[in-house]
Image (cartoon, grey):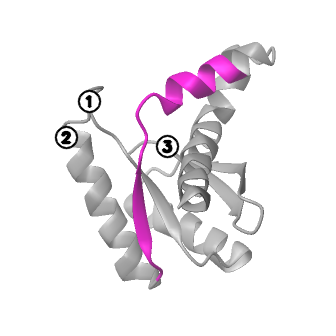
């Protein structure tokens, strides 16, 4: 995982917002950045995007995401759930282009917008059930 998009959500109204992109070079740096965000935002749940093939079957990154989810739960003691992330990066790119954000500026925020889409899908599903 080279970059991790981060979003925050308001469970009461079911709205997700893009927050940050973590681009740490090592696992230690990555978890330190996550720890700082957890301390600042005090979430009650973490949602991890689960990458799969277009047909929903697992691939190599699926196992890495599941391992990352287990590491988060173990390190921070928060419940972690996984949510389908199919097409979120492409959807984020389309949304950014539609807003006139292109090139380097778009790449800078793409992962956090994709995280927002993943979290929004989770919140929408949670509110619907």
Q: Residue at x 45, y 50 (%)?
A: 25
User: Rounded to the nearest whole Å, what is the CA distance between mark 1 and mark 2?
Assistant: 6 Å
Label 3, secondary structure: give it: loop
Q: Label 1: state its secondary structure.
A: loop
The image shows residue 1 at horizontal and vertical percentages of: 38, 45
The answer to which of marks 1 and 3 sits earlier in the sequence is 3
Residue behind mark 1:
53
Where are the magenta residues, as a range? 78-95
Whether label 1 touches label 2, CB < 8 Å? yes
Q: Residues within 10 Å of mark 2 (few under 14, many from 20)?
A: few
Judge left or right: residue 73 versus residue 43. left
Q: Position of residue 116 (x, y in %)?
A: 63, 45
Q: In the image, which disc is placed on residue 122?
A: none
- Residue bearing the label numbered 3: 3
Are there few (<14), some (14-19), or many (20+) residues within 10 Å of tag 1? Answer: some
The answer to whether residue 89 is left or right of residue 50 is right
Question: Which disc number belongs to residue 58?
Answer: 2
* Residue that extends furthest to the front in the rendered view of this protein: 129
Give me the residue at 60% from left, 41% from top.
117
Residue farthest to the right, as pictured: 100
Q: Work out whether 124 lies above or below 105.
A: below
């Amino acid at each position: 995982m080279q970059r991790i998009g981060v979003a925050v959500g308001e469970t009461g109204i079911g709205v997700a917002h893009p927050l940050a992109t973590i681009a740490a070079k090592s696992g230690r740096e990555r978890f330190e950045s996550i720890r700082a965000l957890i301390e600042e935002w005090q979430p009650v749940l973490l949602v991890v995007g689960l990458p799969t093939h277009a047909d929903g079957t697992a691939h190599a990154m699926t196992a890495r995401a599941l391992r990352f989810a287990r590491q988060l739960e173990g390190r921070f003691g928060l419940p972690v759930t996984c949510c389908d992330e199919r097409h979120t990066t492409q959807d984020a790119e389309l949304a950014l282009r539609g807003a006139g954000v292109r090139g380097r500026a778009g790449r800078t925020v793409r992962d956090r917008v994709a995280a927002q889409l993943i979290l929004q899908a989770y919140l929408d599903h949670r509110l619907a059930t």
